[in-house]
Image (cartoon, grey):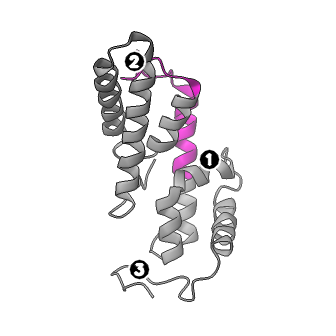
Amino acid sequence: MSPVVPGKKLRYPEHPPIQQIRGELRKALAMACEGLPLTLAELTEAFGDEGESDWRDGYEPHCTDEYLRAFALAVAERLARELTSPPAASPLDDLPLLPEDQAFIRKRTRYRDDEDELIAGYREQWTRAATEEPLNFRQANAGRRAANRWLLERRSNESSGMPKHAGRP
């Protein structure tokens, strides 16, 4: 059994299968986004692994219907702003990003309090590695590999500590 942490009560003291936990969370999130211009997939993405972990551990307030509904409303509002606002200039605009790169970066930085820091770090890693590569035709791939690896490692290292989950998108 995990150690007791202030503010946490174990939702699942018997460690049921992860599929059961995810199924219950999925139902709760589906109810939270009911009637909103928001899909379950969008809300699940915003809730993230950190939110799932909080759900599994019974962390208050993330386990309440009221919190989930408020979170869903905030996500819906953010998505509406993103759809109506022209895209802002990004520090990555001048990098030769592939559509897959953009999806990868978005998945790992969106809804995070430190999104700007992560994007700046990604750019720094890309440009450093591309500059160090002497062959011109290999520079983009060297930059991509270094920046993607950095972003993956940065997120992996955080999973053992406090998450950088943005509670209010």
**Kind of element beneath mark 3:** loop
Q: Amino acid at mark 3?
A: Lys
Which residue is labeled 2 in the image? 139
Q: Residue at x 54, y 23 (%)?
A: 98
In space, the residues marked 2 and 3 are separated at their CA atoms by: 48 Å
Near mark 1 (Cα within 10 A), the count class, few <14, some 14-19 or many ≥20, is some
Measured as percent of width and height from the top left, residue 58 is found at 49, 77
**Kind of element beneath mark 1:** helix
Which residue is labeled 3 in the image? 8
Closest to the observer, 104 or 168: 104
Q: Residue at x 53, y 88 (%)?
A: 13
- Tag 2–tag 1 contact (CB < 8 Å): no
Q: Residue at x 67, y 44 (%)?
A: 37
Q: Is residue 52 left or right of residue 133?
A: right
Q: Of marks 1 and 3, which one's residue comes earlier in the chain?
A: 3
Within the image, what quadrant is residue 141 found in?
A: top left
- Tag 2–tag 3 contact (CB < 8 Å): no
Q: Amino acid at mark 1?
A: Glu
Q: Amino acid at mark 2?
A: Gln
Task: State the extent of the magenta-drawn residues as a range.
Answer: 73-99
Mark yes or no: residue 164 visible. no
Residue 66 vertical position relative to residue 98 in the rendered view, above or below: below
Near mark 3 (Cα within 10 A), the count class, few <14, some 14-19 or many ≥20, is some
Near mark 2 (Cα within 10 A), the count class, few <14, some 14-19 or many ≥20, is some
Measured as percent of width and height from the top left, residue 164 is found at 36, 54
Which residue is labeled 1 in the image? 42
Would residue 96 be counted in the magenta stretch? yes
In space, the residues marked 1 and 3 are separated at their CA atoms by: 26 Å
